[in-house]
Image (tube, grey):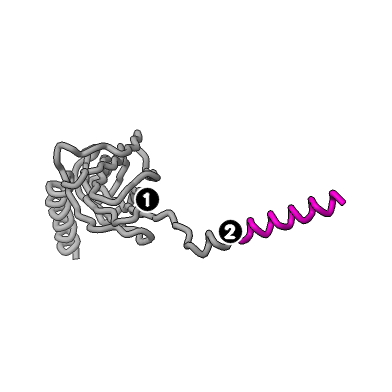
Amino acid sequence: MKLTSSLKKAAGMALLTVAATAANASIFDLGVINPGTPKSFSSFGGGTQFSSFNDTFNFTLSAGTQSSGYSVEAFDFDLASLSFKTTFTNISLFDTHGTLATSDDTLVKEITSAGSKILSFGNTATSSGNYYLTVAGKIDGGGNGYFYNGSISSSVTPVPEPESYAMMLIGLGLMGAIARRRNKSDAV
């Protein structure tokens, strides 16, 4: 029984060690994000206390997108002898202006923190195109791994239908006619 428990712990530590070398600077492709359909993501890895991570999430906002929101939340938990303790230092949104990871990338917005468990922001002037979000943080006190979830959402400002404009004009015309009629009756 003790041998099985020791093997499980050793396998878990080996998994975290492999994850630490690959996940401390990972790049993920989230694909196209459509208005009204948020995209969730998560990341985890291992390391030593106070080691850092910096993950990049590439994505495309579909045509019609006019605003977008970004959030990440860290989760601390223990699993056998493993301890996941995460804090964020910043999240940053970059516009690639067409091609990912080229010299024309522009920082759109950044939120920094001295060790928060939750970071989020909205961007009201987002247009369709290629973007990437970087999430940076560290493994906090006593931890030997990090874990967090995040979400990216986009929305479209609705454009009124022609019928809505017609109804508004009819309503304004009726109000004008009523006001004119009242003015005539008050004058008599």
At label 1, which amino acid type do we have?
Answer: Gln
Q: Residue furthest top?
A: 114
User: Which stretch is magenta?
Assistant: 169-188
User: In what quadrant of the picture does the N terminus appear?
Assistant: bottom left
In the rendered structure, the answer to whether residue 176 lies left or right of residue 74 reads right
Q: Position of residue 120 (x, y in %)?
A: 38, 45
Identified at 84% across, 50% down, the residue is 186
Q: CA distance from mark 1 to mark 2?
A: 25 Å
Q: Nearer the viewer, residue 81 or 131?
A: 131
Q: Position of residue 169 (x, y in %)?
A: 58, 58
Identified at 34% across, 51% down, the residue is 75
Picture layout, residue 52 above or below residue 7: above
Look at discs 1 and 2 and give the one toward the viewer: 2
Query: Mark 2 Cα within 10 Å, few/some/many (few <14, many 20+)?
Result: few
The residue that label 1 is drawn on is: 66
Q: Where residue 168 is drawn, which disc sits there?
A: 2
Asked if residue 181 lies in the magenta stretch, the reply is yes
| Disc nearer the start of the sequence (1/2) | 1
Q: Position of residue 168 (x, y in %)?
A: 58, 58
In the rendered structure, the answer to whether residue 62 lies left or right of residue 165 reads left
